[in-house]
Image (cartoon, helix red, strand yellow):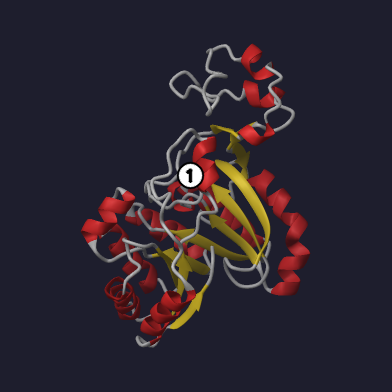
Amino acid sequence: MKNVINYGEKGIVFNIQRFSVNDGPGIRTIVFLKGCPLRCKWCSNPESQSYSRELMFNSKNCIGCGKCKRVCKRGAIDYSSPYRVDRNKCVNCGNCAKVCYPGALVMSGEEKTVREVVSELKKDSIQFRRSGGGVTLSGGDPLTQPEFSLELLKACKSMGWSTAVETEAYVPADTIESVIPWVDVVLLDIKNIDTDKYLRYTGVNNDIILKNVKRISELGVRTITRVPVIPKFNADEKSIGKIAEFTRSLGTVDELHLLPYHKLGVNKYKCLGRKYELENMETPDREYMEKFKKIVESYGLKCNVGAR
Protein backbone atom coordinates (compact mmCIF):
# COMPACT_ATOMS: atom_id res chain seq x y z
CA MET A 1 0.00 0.00 0.00
CA LYS A 2 1.40 3.39 -1.00
CA ASN A 3 0.43 5.07 2.29
CA VAL A 4 2.31 2.56 4.43
CA ILE A 5 5.64 4.04 5.57
CA ASN A 6 8.80 1.94 5.42
CA TYR A 7 10.73 3.38 8.36
CA GLY A 8 13.53 0.91 7.71
CA GLU A 9 14.32 2.34 4.25
CA LYS A 10 17.97 3.43 4.15
CA GLY A 11 19.66 6.40 2.49
CA ILE A 12 23.01 8.19 2.55
CA VAL A 13 22.78 11.51 4.43
CA PHE A 14 25.73 13.88 4.67
CA ASN A 15 24.30 16.73 6.75
CA ILE A 16 21.26 17.92 8.69
CA GLN A 17 21.12 21.71 8.90
CA ARG A 18 18.75 23.56 11.20
CA PHE A 19 17.20 27.04 11.28
CA SER A 20 17.12 27.66 7.53
CA VAL A 21 14.83 30.45 6.32
CA ASN A 22 15.76 30.35 2.61
CA ASP A 23 14.65 26.87 1.60
CA GLY A 24 10.88 26.94 1.89
CA PRO A 25 8.31 28.63 4.12
CA GLY A 26 8.97 29.23 7.82
CA ILE A 27 11.94 27.90 9.75
CA ARG A 28 13.15 24.67 8.20
CA THR A 29 15.52 21.81 8.80
CA ILE A 30 17.36 20.66 5.70
CA VAL A 31 18.30 17.03 5.19
CA PHE A 32 21.15 16.78 2.68
CA LEU A 33 21.33 13.53 0.72
CA LYS A 34 24.33 12.23 -1.19
CA GLY A 35 24.26 11.80 -4.94
CA CYS A 36 23.90 14.04 -7.97
CA PRO A 37 24.15 13.20 -11.70
CA LEU A 38 25.25 16.76 -12.53
CA ARG A 39 28.79 18.10 -12.24
CA CYS A 40 28.18 21.83 -12.09
CA LYS A 41 31.51 23.65 -12.16
CA TRP A 42 30.35 26.05 -9.42
CA CYS A 43 28.92 23.38 -7.08
CA SER A 44 29.26 24.52 -3.45
CA ASN A 45 28.66 21.00 -2.09
CA PRO A 46 31.08 18.81 -4.09
CA GLU A 47 30.92 16.20 -1.32
CA SER A 48 27.28 15.71 -2.32
CA GLN A 49 28.01 14.51 -5.85
CA SER A 50 29.14 10.95 -5.14
CA TYR A 51 26.53 8.44 -3.97
CA SER A 52 29.04 6.84 -1.59
CA ARG A 53 30.73 8.00 1.58
CA GLU A 54 33.86 10.09 0.97
CA LEU A 55 36.91 10.97 3.03
CA MET A 56 37.69 14.67 3.42
CA PHE A 57 40.96 16.15 4.74
CA ASN A 58 41.19 19.63 6.29
CA SER A 59 44.87 20.50 6.73
CA LYS A 60 44.09 23.29 9.22
CA ASN A 61 42.98 20.73 11.79
CA CYS A 62 45.89 18.32 11.36
CA ILE A 63 48.37 18.07 14.29
CA GLY A 64 50.62 15.51 12.58
CA CYS A 65 50.10 12.78 15.20
CA GLY A 66 50.46 9.97 12.65
CA LYS A 67 47.57 7.86 13.93
CA CYS A 68 45.83 7.92 10.55
CA LYS A 69 48.88 6.50 8.81
CA ARG A 70 49.23 3.68 11.32
CA VAL A 71 45.64 2.45 10.94
CA CYS A 72 45.42 2.72 7.14
CA LYS A 73 45.78 -0.80 5.74
CA ARG A 74 45.84 0.47 2.15
CA GLY A 75 48.82 2.81 2.56
CA ALA A 76 46.66 5.68 1.34
CA ILE A 77 47.93 8.28 3.84
CA ASP A 78 50.68 10.33 2.21
CA TYR A 79 52.31 13.01 4.36
CA SER A 80 54.25 14.36 1.39
CA SER A 81 51.01 15.36 -0.36
CA PRO A 82 49.14 18.56 0.54
CA TYR A 83 45.93 16.55 0.12
CA ARG A 84 47.22 13.88 2.58
CA VAL A 85 45.14 11.11 0.94
CA ASP A 86 46.10 9.06 -2.11
CA ARG A 87 42.66 8.72 -3.71
CA ASN A 88 43.85 5.89 -5.95
CA LYS A 89 44.50 3.74 -2.88
CA CYS A 90 41.78 5.00 -0.51
CA VAL A 91 38.66 2.82 -0.25
CA ASN A 92 36.79 5.21 2.10
CA CYS A 93 36.70 2.68 4.92
CA GLY A 94 36.79 5.53 7.47
CA ASN A 95 39.33 3.93 9.82
CA CYS A 96 41.59 6.98 9.69
CA ALA A 97 38.70 9.34 10.44
CA LYS A 98 37.77 7.28 13.51
CA VAL A 99 41.17 7.95 15.12
CA CYS A 100 41.49 11.56 13.96
CA TYR A 101 40.36 13.36 17.10
CA PRO A 102 41.24 16.88 15.85
CA GLY A 103 38.82 16.35 12.94
CA ALA A 104 41.28 16.78 10.09
CA LEU A 105 39.99 13.58 8.47
CA VAL A 106 36.21 13.18 8.39
CA MET A 107 33.81 10.99 6.48
CA SER A 108 31.12 12.74 4.46
CA GLY A 109 28.00 10.63 4.33
CA GLU A 110 26.36 8.19 6.68
CA GLU A 111 23.78 5.51 6.05
CA LYS A 112 20.61 6.25 8.00
CA THR A 113 17.13 4.80 8.15
CA VAL A 114 13.99 6.90 7.79
CA ARG A 115 13.30 6.15 11.45
CA GLU A 116 16.67 7.58 12.51
CA VAL A 117 16.23 10.78 10.50
CA VAL A 118 12.68 11.35 11.71
CA SER A 119 13.85 10.87 15.29
CA GLU A 120 16.36 13.67 14.73
CA LEU A 121 13.77 15.91 13.04
CA LYS A 122 11.33 15.53 15.92
CA LYS A 123 13.65 17.78 17.95
CA ASP A 124 12.54 20.66 15.70
CA SER A 125 8.81 19.97 15.65
CA ILE A 126 7.95 22.92 17.91
CA GLN A 127 9.67 25.43 15.65
CA PHE A 128 7.97 23.86 12.63
CA ARG A 129 4.58 24.40 14.24
CA ARG A 130 5.27 27.93 15.45
CA SER A 131 6.83 29.21 12.21
CA GLY A 132 4.85 27.27 9.63
CA GLY A 133 8.11 25.62 8.63
CA GLY A 134 9.09 22.03 8.07
CA VAL A 135 11.58 19.75 6.37
CA THR A 136 13.44 20.35 3.11
CA LEU A 137 15.30 17.59 1.30
CA SER A 138 18.38 18.79 -0.56
CA GLY A 139 21.73 17.44 -1.66
CA GLY A 140 23.06 16.60 -4.16
CA ASP A 141 19.65 15.88 -5.55
CA PRO A 142 17.37 13.96 -3.17
CA LEU A 143 15.33 12.60 -6.07
CA THR A 144 18.33 10.46 -7.04
CA GLN A 145 17.62 8.50 -3.84
CA PRO A 146 13.92 8.15 -4.71
CA GLU A 147 12.95 5.28 -2.42
CA PHE A 148 14.49 6.87 0.66
CA SER A 149 13.17 10.36 -0.20
CA LEU A 150 9.66 9.00 -0.76
CA GLU A 151 9.50 7.19 2.56
CA LEU A 152 11.03 10.13 4.44
CA LEU A 153 8.55 12.55 2.88
CA LYS A 154 5.65 10.25 3.75
CA ALA A 155 6.90 10.07 7.33
CA CYS A 156 7.18 13.86 7.53
CA LYS A 157 3.65 14.31 6.18
CA SER A 158 2.36 11.83 8.77
CA MET A 159 3.82 14.14 11.44
CA GLY A 160 1.99 17.12 9.95
CA TRP A 161 5.20 18.82 8.80
CA SER A 162 5.51 20.92 5.67
CA THR A 163 7.70 19.23 3.05
CA ALA A 164 9.94 20.71 0.37
CA VAL A 165 12.43 19.29 -2.12
CA GLU A 166 15.27 21.00 -3.90
CA THR A 167 15.94 19.34 -7.25
CA GLU A 168 17.31 19.80 -10.77
CA ALA A 169 14.77 17.18 -11.95
CA TYR A 170 17.34 15.14 -13.89
CA VAL A 171 15.63 11.86 -12.94
CA PRO A 172 13.35 9.27 -14.57
CA ALA A 173 9.78 10.42 -15.14
CA ASP A 174 8.37 7.78 -12.79
CA THR A 175 10.37 9.32 -9.92
CA ILE A 176 8.53 12.60 -10.49
CA GLU A 177 5.20 10.76 -10.48
CA SER A 178 5.89 8.87 -7.26
CA VAL A 179 7.70 11.46 -5.12
CA ILE A 180 6.38 14.92 -6.02
CA PRO A 181 2.77 14.28 -4.81
CA TRP A 182 4.22 14.07 -1.27
CA VAL A 183 5.86 17.50 -1.56
CA ASP A 184 4.30 20.83 -0.59
CA VAL A 185 6.95 23.03 -2.24
CA VAL A 186 9.37 22.22 -5.05
CA LEU A 187 12.50 24.37 -5.18
CA LEU A 188 13.37 23.83 -8.80
CA ASP A 189 16.82 24.63 -10.16
CA ILE A 190 16.64 25.86 -13.73
CA LYS A 191 20.19 26.82 -14.62
CA ASN A 192 19.92 27.58 -18.33
CA ILE A 193 17.64 26.94 -21.29
CA ASP A 194 20.53 26.73 -23.76
CA THR A 195 21.26 23.01 -24.24
CA ASP A 196 24.90 23.40 -25.33
CA LYS A 197 25.83 25.61 -22.38
CA TYR A 198 23.98 23.33 -19.98
CA LEU A 199 25.95 20.32 -21.17
CA ARG A 200 29.28 22.17 -21.14
CA TYR A 201 28.93 23.49 -17.58
CA THR A 202 27.00 20.67 -15.87
CA GLY A 203 27.92 17.55 -17.83
CA VAL A 204 24.33 16.62 -18.75
CA ASN A 205 21.75 17.52 -21.38
CA ASN A 206 18.73 19.50 -20.14
CA ASP A 207 16.05 17.84 -22.34
CA ILE A 208 14.93 15.47 -19.56
CA ILE A 209 15.02 18.32 -17.05
CA LEU A 210 12.74 20.60 -19.07
CA LYS A 211 10.25 17.77 -19.67
CA ASN A 212 10.17 16.94 -15.95
CA VAL A 213 9.77 20.61 -15.04
CA LYS A 214 6.67 20.78 -17.21
CA ARG A 215 5.28 17.66 -15.57
CA ILE A 216 5.92 19.04 -12.08
CA SER A 217 3.99 22.17 -13.01
CA GLU A 218 1.10 20.02 -14.24
CA LEU A 219 0.92 18.23 -10.88
CA GLY A 220 -0.11 21.51 -9.27
CA VAL A 221 2.54 21.52 -6.52
CA ARG A 222 3.70 24.97 -5.47
CA THR A 223 6.96 25.50 -7.35
CA ILE A 224 9.65 28.16 -7.01
CA THR A 225 12.24 28.42 -9.77
CA ARG A 226 15.77 28.99 -8.47
CA VAL A 227 18.53 30.22 -10.76
CA PRO A 228 22.20 30.20 -9.74
CA VAL A 229 23.58 33.27 -11.53
CA ILE A 230 26.99 32.24 -12.87
CA PRO A 231 29.29 34.52 -14.93
CA LYS A 232 30.02 33.20 -18.45
CA PHE A 233 27.21 30.65 -18.05
CA ASN A 234 23.96 32.54 -17.55
CA ALA A 235 24.81 35.94 -16.02
CA ASP A 236 23.54 37.86 -19.03
CA GLU A 237 20.24 39.45 -20.01
CA LYS A 238 19.46 36.93 -22.76
CA SER A 239 19.92 33.86 -20.56
CA ILE A 240 17.96 35.28 -17.62
CA GLY A 241 15.22 36.42 -19.98
CA LYS A 242 14.88 32.95 -21.51
CA ILE A 243 14.68 31.30 -18.09
CA ALA A 244 12.02 33.80 -16.99
CA GLU A 245 10.09 33.28 -20.23
CA PHE A 246 10.17 29.49 -19.79
CA THR A 247 9.10 29.78 -16.15
CA ARG A 248 6.18 32.00 -17.09
CA SER A 249 5.13 29.61 -19.87
CA LEU A 250 4.56 26.86 -17.30
CA GLY A 251 1.42 28.69 -16.21
CA THR A 252 1.51 27.50 -12.60
CA VAL A 253 4.82 29.05 -11.42
CA ASP A 254 4.86 32.72 -10.45
CA GLU A 255 8.04 33.01 -8.39
CA LEU A 256 11.72 32.95 -9.39
CA HIS A 257 14.73 33.37 -7.10
CA LEU A 258 18.10 34.59 -8.38
CA LEU A 259 21.05 33.15 -6.43
CA PRO A 260 24.33 35.00 -7.12
CA TYR A 261 27.47 32.93 -7.55
CA HIS A 262 29.63 32.57 -4.43
CA LYS A 263 32.79 30.75 -3.37
CA LEU A 264 31.63 29.40 0.00
CA GLY A 265 32.36 25.81 -0.98
CA VAL A 266 35.78 26.29 -2.59
CA ASN A 267 37.76 24.83 0.33
CA LYS A 268 35.76 21.60 0.10
CA TYR A 269 37.41 20.81 -3.24
CA LYS A 270 40.84 20.86 -1.60
CA CYS A 271 39.48 18.67 1.20
CA LEU A 272 38.45 16.14 -1.47
CA GLY A 273 41.72 16.43 -3.35
CA ARG A 274 40.04 18.08 -6.30
CA LYS A 275 40.72 21.22 -8.32
CA TYR A 276 38.16 24.05 -8.34
CA GLU A 277 37.83 25.20 -11.94
CA LEU A 278 36.25 28.64 -11.37
CA GLU A 279 38.88 30.02 -9.00
CA ASN A 280 39.12 33.43 -10.71
CA MET A 281 35.40 34.01 -11.16
CA GLU A 282 33.83 36.96 -9.34
CA THR A 283 30.38 37.27 -7.76
CA PRO A 284 27.96 39.41 -9.83
CA ASP A 285 27.58 42.80 -8.14
CA ARG A 286 24.33 44.24 -6.80
CA GLU A 287 23.79 46.43 -9.87
CA TYR A 288 23.86 43.38 -12.16
CA MET A 289 21.54 41.40 -9.91
CA GLU A 290 19.03 44.25 -9.76
CA LYS A 291 19.08 44.44 -13.55
CA PHE A 292 18.36 40.72 -13.78
CA LYS A 293 15.61 41.07 -11.19
CA LYS A 294 13.85 43.69 -13.31
CA ILE A 295 14.04 41.37 -16.33
CA VAL A 296 12.38 38.58 -14.35
CA GLU A 297 9.69 40.93 -13.02
CA SER A 298 8.95 42.11 -16.56
CA TYR A 299 7.57 38.63 -17.19
CA GLY A 300 5.08 39.06 -14.35
CA LEU A 301 7.03 36.89 -11.91
CA LYS A 302 7.85 37.60 -8.26
CA CYS A 303 11.60 37.77 -7.87
CA ASN A 304 13.91 37.53 -4.87
CA VAL A 305 17.67 37.94 -4.91
CA GLY A 306 19.56 36.02 -2.27
CA ALA A 307 22.23 33.47 -1.42
CA ARG A 308 21.69 29.74 -1.16
> Number of callouts in the render?
1
Q: Position of residue 21 (x, y in %)?
A: 64, 68
Q: Is residue 270 above or below residue 182?
A: above
What residue is at 73 percent from the left and 31 percent from the top?
Answer: 102
Residue 256 in picture, x, y percent from top left: 44, 75
Is 45 or 173 nearer to us in this picture? 45
The spot of residue 233 in percent (x, y) is 32, 61
* Residue drawn at point x = 59 percent, y = 43 percent: 14
- Hey, which residue is sitting farthest left in the picture? 196
Identify which residue is drawn at 54% across, 47% down. 33
Residue 229 visible, this orientation: yes
Residue 221 in sight in this render: no
| Residue at image mark 1 | 46
User: For the residue marked with disc 1, what is the amino acid?
Assistant: Pro
Residue at the (29%, 71%) spot, across then down: 239
Check the image and name the residue furthest to the front.
280
- The C terminus: image quadrant: bottom right
Residue 28 lies, with reference to residue 96, above or below; the image says below
Q: Secondary structure at mark 1?
A: helix
Q: Residue 229 occupies which quadrant of the picture?
A: bottom left
- Quarter residue 100 falls in: top right
Q: Position of residue 275 (x, y in %)?
A: 42, 39
> Can you say whether 304 is above or below 80 in the image?
below
